[in-house]
Every structure is written in C-alpha cells, then in structure tokens.
Amino acid sequence: MKSLNKLPYIVLMFGLFILGLNSQLHAQTVFEAQLSGSNEVPAITSMANGSVMATLDGNELTVEGSFESLSSPLATDIAGGAHLHTGMAGENGAVIFPLTVTANGSTAGTFEAANNTFTLSSGQVDTLMMRGVYINIHSENYAGGELRGQLLPESDTYMRSNLSGAFEVPSAKTMANGSLVYELRGDSLFVSGSFTQLTDEFDAAIAGGSHLHIGSAGSNGAVAISLNATLSEDLLSGVYYASDNAFELTAEQKTALMNRMVYANIHTKAYAGGELRGQVVPANSTTFFAQLSGSAEQPSVATAASGGVVLEVQEDTLTVSGSFSGLESAFNTEVGSHLHMANAGQNGGVEVVLNADLETNMMAGTYSSENNMYTLSAEQKTALFARNMYVNVHSVDIGSGEIRGQVLGDATAYFHTNLSGWHEIQPIMSSAFGAASIEYKSNGNIILSGGFEGLSSALATDIAGGGHLHIGGVSTNGDVAIPINISVGENDTTGAFASSENMFALTTEQATALFDEQMYVNIHSADFQSGELRGQVLFASNFAPSAPVLTSPADDATLSLEGAATTTFEATWEAATDTNSNEISYIWQLSTDAEFENVVVNANVGAETSFQTDFATLDGLLNELGVEVGSTATVYHRVIASDGSDEAISETNVANLERGMLTSNEERLNNPTKFGLEQNYPNPFNPTTNISFSLSEGGETTLTVYNLLGQQVATVVNSRFSAGNHTVSFDASALSSGIYIYRLKAQNQTMTKRMTLIK
C-alpha cells in the first residue's frame, strides 16, 4: 500500500497545486452525505434513509436532497428538525445552520436548494473541506438524531467503520468508541474520523498504532495500510484527517474493500491486539452485528468456537458477511447455517439460508458479501430491527447449533445472559429457561431484549412488573436497579423483553456495574417470589468455566451416619478455571437418582470449594426418604461451576449412606449458663424446621427471620420466655427457596444464624 506522499514526486506536486488552487479560488466543489441511523453517535437502528448533495461555490453552500421512513414525525420543535453540524465522523458537534425541510408527510421530506443556501465563513469552509461537517435529522423518537451523514467530497463510493471493542477478536472490554468514513475515487482512498475514551494510551509503537487490515468480521488479518492519527495530549482520543490519510490502493486491496474484507484497528497499551475495531461497510446502510458463541445457543453449548457476522440493510436488501472458526466438529453441510426468527432465549424457524465458504478442515468458514445478498420480506425486516433474528451455525456433533449470535444494532459493547433457576441464590429446580441481550451505547444508554418461557407459575407482575436488572455478583443478591418491561405470553408463564420497550439510561454507578459484570436479570413467579429465573449479565463473548473435579467423598464411597449428630459431613472439589476470568460460584447437588431429577440438596456455596453440613441434616434427609435406621441408601452427588450465565458440571459420584444411630446434642442445653442460639434442625428444610435457643434469665424475647436483602419476612417468637432451653417450630410454607437469616433478641443481646429452605 502506498500513501500519497510516496507517489511519484511530480504527481504529488501536481495534486497539491490543484488542491491549493481550488482552495484559493473557492471553485465549485460537490459534497455528498449518505444518511443512515448507523452514522449517528451513538449509532441507532432505523429503517429511515436518505441522501444529500451540497455544492460549495466560493463560500456559498447550497444543500438539496431528501429523506424518508423516519420512525416517528420529524422533530420540528428542535429548531426545525434538521441541521448542519460541525464534527468529524464519530463525534457530535454544534449546529451551524438549521435546514429548511419541505415536508412529504410527517416522516419524510426534501431539502430544496432555493430554501437551503448558506454563506460560510472562511473557517467553516476549512472545516467542510476537512470533512468536519455533517447533516443531522431529528425525529420525535430520536431527539438526538435518527439520520446522519458526513458531508464528503464527491466520490465513487462512500463507506463507514463504526469502532467498538466488541468487534475485536477476541473482544475488548472497553467503553471506547469512534467512527471512520472512507471516500473512494478511482483507486484513491481517503480516510477521516475520530475515536475517544480509550482504556489506555494509544500505542504508536505498534507500527504507528492504527491500521487498515484485510480480514472478514470475526477473524483477524494482516495489516494493509498504516493510518495517521492526530492524538490528544492524554493519548486517549484521536482524529484522522483526510489530508494525512490518503492512499493509493492495489487491485487486491480495492477488491477486499468492496467485499467487506477490510477493517480498521486501533491498538493501545492495554490491548496490544486492538482496543477498537470496525468493519468497512457502505455508508448508506443500517448495520447490525451478531457475535457468535456457544453461550448464545439455547440451551448453551460449551465450545471454544467463535465468530462474528455483520449484517447490512439497504431498503429491503440484506447483505451478510463475516466468519467463524474453532468448531468442535465439522460444519454440518446437510443442515448448514441460517438466520432464524426468534428473540434471545428462544429458538425459532429458519428464515434465510446462509452460504458459507468452508476451509478444508470444515471447522471454519467465511460468509462473503457477494454470496450472501437477500431480499427481506416485510416481516423479516421488522423482526431484524426488533432484535428478533439470530445467526446459527450447525456442526455434525451439535446438530441444533454449536454457535449462535443474536442480531443486534451497532453498539459500544454487547452483553448476554442465560436465565436459569440454577443461578438463583439459593438454586431452585425449574424447567423454565430464557436469555437476555444488552446493547450498551456510548452515551450510557442500553437496549435490552430477550425472553423466557416455562415458568412453574404465573409471572409475579405485582413485584414491580415481575422482572428486573439488579446490581450484585454471582453469589450475592442485590437491589433492583431497573425494572424490565415484559410482554406476557401464554398462561402468563412466558414473556418477551421487546427492545422498543426496554431502552434505559444508566447512571454512572450502573454503567460501572455493567462493565464490571456485576448486574443480573431476575424473573419472579407466583411460586418463587424471590425469583425463578436469574442470569448474570456478562460480556457476550463468554465461554463456560471448566468442569470442576470432585475429590471427596470418593466415587462409590460408603459413609456411616452414626455417633454425634453434629459430626461434619464435607464434599470437596478442585476449583474450576474460567477463560474470561469471571467470578465463579459452585452448586453442590445431592440426588436420589443418577439423572438428578430428584435433587434433595441444591446448595450454592459461593466461591468455596466444599459443601459442609452435619450428620443430623443428612439423617433428616434419609428419614424423609423413608430410609430406616440400619438401612443403606445409594445417592448421587456432583458439583456445578457457574459464572452466573453458563455452567460446567463435574462427573457424578455415587455415595452409599448407612443410617445409624445419632447422639443428640440437646444435653448441652439442659443447664444453660448463657444466652445461646442453635443451628436449626433439619437444615436445609422443607417447609418446617425447629429452632432451639437458651436464655440465662427470663424476659421479652423475639425470634425473627430475614431474607438476604435484610427484609423481615417472618416473626417466629415475640413474647416473654423463662430462663432455660426452648425449641420452637418455624413453618416457611409462604416463603420461596433460599437462604434466610434468623435472629434471636433478648436480654439486650442479639445472635443470628443462617438457614436454607429448599422446596
């Protein structure tokens, strides 16, 4: 690749002479702007489109063109609804001139030359020539702008790259963003735009720090052109001026550019492989992105395979490009890969068959734009814009799909979570399932979409709508941050999160929690008031943890339950690892069957690599199962490593429990000398348990129960008790499964313990 400063000297001097002459004489220059919602900052997904031509004659600028299909009426209250602004691609700027729109209905209009002629200052002319002026059209739904286009000198082709860490391979977890625009005239390419909010300093030591590479979405490729950025003092932002970024393309590079096989990449010290990336696509298209992973499958698939797909819509034409790699088994040519119609968390029918060019090993492939152009029906187009379509890649071993990606609008970052009863604290056994996707925009707004089905009872809409985003880690419960708007379906046990109804502006605290992966989705049902479905919101490029390994009890071990009831029982395992460095929690399960259909213990122990209880609790379980003293029961146990969205399950071990005679510890309380609270028995319990306590002197006594949010949920005792030992029964029929705190208060003293309810 050659930059213009490497062209033959005489050609360069001639070009500079002509440019200088034009500048001096202010000769007539034509500019064009391709209008799309994807050109907005931040980008939006809109079916609207349009184009504008602006002619500069001396310092007189005349604007004409048209637009149509706004999602809502033109926002005429915003200084007429359309304007010329200053600002490079990727940044927003101030209004220079309001444009006069000749309305064609409420959602379309034209710019007539006679009504849109303006006198520019010399500074404004210079800004225009630097590609620093754009047109913005505001609608009632999008007050910040629904259609935008950078005014660029007349060229053969105009293209755009929206820059995001999510487009990197692998993804970069960053709030940085930006955009570049490209003018192609013959074989000459001019690049301009900007970026901001890098996590760390721009790294010019990496061959200049930013480049154009040849490679499809979802894969990495070699550097083709080194770009020249003008950097801010802190090296966290930058601008690309066309005068510094003019290049002469080879035939191969030009072909790659036109075939969506070129991407921009910006390197930083924190992300040497690239913190910001954007595939080069036509400027007049509305673009979407699907990040492919096993985590997005329903149910999720533990695979190292990955990929990325860019989807462009121009009126009713869909163009798909991208790639995938690392399949665990060969691409299933009999089934293939497709666009399906369904929201995140649900499976849907095939709508479009995609054409993949496969590598020799059949484990990787590319979607070329020339082989993947389709005409969308009105229903398909509506579904696409509503985030109700996904890409699915099928392999031989996983015929239903090994990697999948929900089709979402351009964003700064993408997040995803799988919803399961296992993720609740404490876990519950529920056949319900679902998922949610989140698009984070550079202005701090998010768009949430997805759905669920199969709740055991109706959605608890009386609990602030029934679904929420909470702030909290994998092993903790947290406060509600944002109520989710749910469209309830059949029997009130299914629901959808429509993207149009779930657009929220995050506070700084909430945005930080989101990027720290400290937010979760919780869905409440009538039977499970504290939550039946939950999922930790993680970056969409997530992989499941490794499977933990049980270390004790050994497989087929025999354990005799006799002696002191307080004897400790412990199950242990080796820690799992997580490719994404996510927080991991462990769930230990004990079941009466190898298929774990009758789970009797289902305990989340957080980050601990062991589960502990006592012989008394196990004895109580055996008693409930009808195992007599002197008999042996065969049970099965395993441990699940979870990042709150995806799981890995250990091998199952068999344990043989011999039920012997236990010695009670009640004798310890016969002659109490001090205030004391005992562990409830049995624990875990369902739905009743006994709580023992001792008082050294009589008096008013309260025994209350709280959930992990600190909310009082029951009063067990509130009366006067004499000195001595006391045992009371607690019935938790009205509560859902979970960990609760019970608190004894008497004699100006307080003591608390935890208990676990498993229904």
Image (cartoon, rainbow, N blue to C red):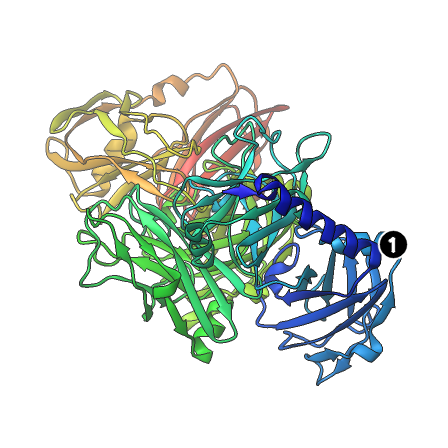
Which x, y percent locates residue 676?
49, 22
Instruction: Tell me if 97 is positioned left or right of 45 in this view.
Output: right
Q: Quadrant of residue 44?
A: bottom right
* 153 to 275, vertically: above or below: below
Q: Residue furthest bottom?
A: 105
Could you tell whether 469 is left or right of 668 in the image? right
Please identify the residue farthest to the top as the structure is shown.
673
- Return the x and y of residue 314 as percentages of the image width and height: 51, 71
Q: Mark 1, residues whose alpha carbon is within 10 Å: few (<14), some, or many (≥20)?
A: few
Callout 1 amino acid = Ser
Residue at image point 29% right, 48% down: 301
**Residue occupying the point 62% across, 77% down:** 69
Q: Position of residue 166 (x, y in %)?
A: 49, 45
State the residue lying farthest toward the front: 10
Q: Along the line of sight, which residue is nearer the eye, 31 or 415? A: 31
Which residue corresponds to mark 1? 122
Mark 1 residue element: helix
Picture layout, residue 430 above or below residue 471: below
Query: In the picture shown, does residue 264 fall above or below 658?
Result: below
Residue at (52, 64) in percent of width and height: 486
Q: Note whether residue 532 is visible.
A: no
Residue drawn where x is 19% and y is 35% of the image: 651
- Res. 183 image quadrant: bottom right
The residue lying toward the viewer, choosing from 155 and 75, is 155
Could you tell whether 66 is left or right of 213 in the image?
right
**Residue 594 locus on image (x, y percent):** 16, 43
Total number of numbered labels? 1
Residue 590 in sight here: yes
Does residue 1 appear to the left or right of 121 in the view shown?
Answer: left
Q: Is residue 356 above or below residue 205?
A: below
* Front residue of this view, candidates 220 and 43: 220
